[in-house]
Image (tube, rainbow, N blue to C red):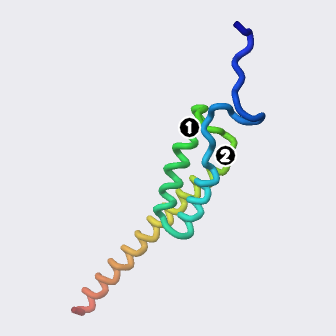
Amino acid sequence: MSQYPPQASGPPGSYGSMRPHRGALVLVLGILGLLLCVILGIIAWVMGNGDLRQMDAGVMDPAGRGLTQAGRILGMISCILAILGIAIWVIFVGLAVIGAAASGGP
């Protein structure tokens, strides 16, 4: 029996049997969620939370932590902007309905 702990397999600088990070994917989804579709922002937010949890548990390669955090934050921002946009739209529609009712229109 050896007095040294078993060495991780893989190339130098790798994290052995850890899952590879998906930081670039989360970042791309966060950017696309901000620019194109809020659904992609939600996906980036959820994937980012899960990946960060796995990095903290030591299951996923922590090298992509910065990219993952940036993508998750962009996903959050896209969701917040979508909610604000919907709220502003509801207010404008409500004001239009109130204005039409007050003017006696059809």
**Which amino acid type is shown beneath numbered disc 1?**
Gln
Q: Which image quarter is the C terminus in? A: bottom left
**Residue receiving disc 2:** 64
> Is residue 100 placed above or below 79 in the rendered structure?
below
Q: Residue furthest right?
A: 12
Label 1: element kind: helix
Please state if 24 lies on the left or on the right of 46 as rendered: right
Inter-mark Cα distance, 2 to 1: 12 Å
Query: What residue sits 62% from the left and 44% below the top?
Result: 21
Query: What residue sits 63% from the left and 50% below the top?
Result: 23
Q: Position of residue 15 (x, y in %)?
A: 69, 34
Label 2: element kind: helix
The quadrant holding residue 2 is: top right
Q: Position of residue 64 (x, y in %)?
A: 67, 46
The quadrant holding residue 55 is: top right
Q: Position of residue 31 (x, y in %)?
A: 59, 63
**Which amino acid type is shown beneath numbered disc 2?**
Gly
Q: Which image quarter is the N terminus in? A: top right
Query: What residue sits 44% from the left and 65% below the top?
Result: 83
Q: Please say if the residues under marks 2 and 1 sit with CB atoms less than 8 Å apart.
A: no
Please state if 94 lies on the left or on the right of 87 as rendered: left
Q: Residue furthest top?
A: 1
Query: What residue sits 54% from the left and 60% below the top?
Result: 77
> Is residue 74 placed above or below 100 in the rendered structure?
above
Q: Which mark is residue 54?
A: 1
